[in-house]
Image (cartoon, helix red, strand yellow):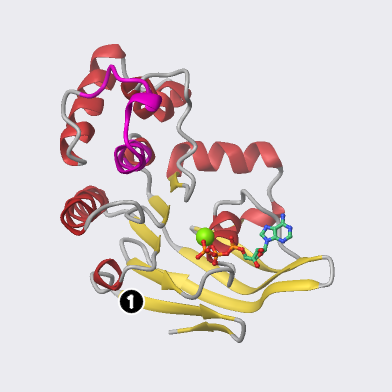
Amino acid sequence: MSLVVRALAKRYGSMTVFCDVSLQVRRGEFVAIVGESGVGKSTLLNCMAGLDSWDQGSVSLDGEDIGAMDEDARAMLRRHKVGFVFQAFHVLPHLDVAQNIALPLMLLGRGDRHAHAQRVAELLEAVGLPGLGRRLPQQLSGGQLQRVAIARALAHRPALLLADEPTGNLDARTATMVMDALLAQTRAQGASLVLVTHSQASAARADRILQLSAAGMAG
Ligand SMILES: Nc1ncnc2c1ncn2[C@@H]1O[C@H](COP(=O)(O)OP(=O)(O)OP(=O)(O)O)[C@@H](O)[C@H]1O
Ligand SMILES: [Mg+2]
């Protein structure tokens, strides 16, 4: 899926988070966004998914201006085409690991229980958590939870994956494995990947690195 951000500005009252941010992500491209803490990376990613509002500019997915859509249309677009790994996981505490990962498939009503179980097992394997499907989130470590959040974002094979610090809580070896899984899954589907990261090693694997700063976006 292609993504175009044009002259985007976000403010909280009189505080400007960013202004005049423009970027393009081509179909199948992997773009990393780096920048200091507080500069607005998570905010920008939320805007790209239509999960947050902005004050000026536009965001288009596959040529469709998501600012012009109503909330229902945006939710439907996300459900079908977008995967999101939140910086703060947002794993549902009352569902076990397998149910959390299968959630996007349940929402889509795509495939039967057997197909869901198969996809969940494949993803658990890919993120290095084979056999942990029956655990509850509280029975996992932070890094394991983060990997569940990644598996969930990939479950429905989204055309666009937006990932906010997906390896922030992982040791170097596990981070590499999770990045391998993220890349393999997105490349296999020809999906686009936007990765926000503080990790040099992860950013270095992107097709392009963009730097967000108070002055705007620089390539
Ligand atoms: N609801 C809010 N009201 C006011 N200011 C906010 C709100 N949410 C975020 N901010 C501010 O917006 C700025 C951007 O926040 P954001 O979370 O996008 O930063 P970030 O680049 O993702 O940082 P980090 O690398 O630490 O995750 C910060 O200065 C933050 O304090
Ligand atoms: Mg952030």
Q: Quadrant of residue 204?
A: bottom left
Up-down relation of residue 132 to residue 67 (above or below) = above
Image quarter where ligand 1 lies: bottom right
- Tag 1: Cα neighbours inside 10 Å, few (<14), some, or many (≥20)? some
Q: Is residue 96 left or right of residue 114?
A: right
Q: Is residue 168 left or right of residue 82?
A: left
Up-down relation of residue 43 to residue 24 (above or below) = above
The quadrant of the image that shows the C terminus is bottom left
- Residue 3 visible (yes or no): yes
Up-down relation of residue 58 to residue 94 (above or below) = below
- Residue 63 visible (yes or no): no
Where in the figure is residue 34, as x and y percent of width and height? 43, 73
Where in the figure is residue 54, as x and y percent of width and height? 71, 62
Where in the figure is residue 36, as x and y percent of width and height? 50, 75
- Amino acid at circle 1: Arg
Up-down relation of residue 143 to residue 152 (above or below) = below
Residue located 59% across and 38% down the image: 75
Residue located 61% across and 74% down the image: 6
Where in the figure is residue 88, as x and y percent of width and height? 49, 45
The quadrant of the image that shows the N terminus is bottom left
Give SS at disc 1. Answer: strand
- Identify the residue under disc 1: 208
Q: Quadrant of residue 156?
A: top left
- The secondary structure that dominates the magenta segment is helix
* Residue 76: in magenta span: no
Residue located 43% across and 19% down the image: 95
Q: Residue furthest top?
A: 113
Residue located 59% across and 68% down the image: 40
Magenta residues?
132-150
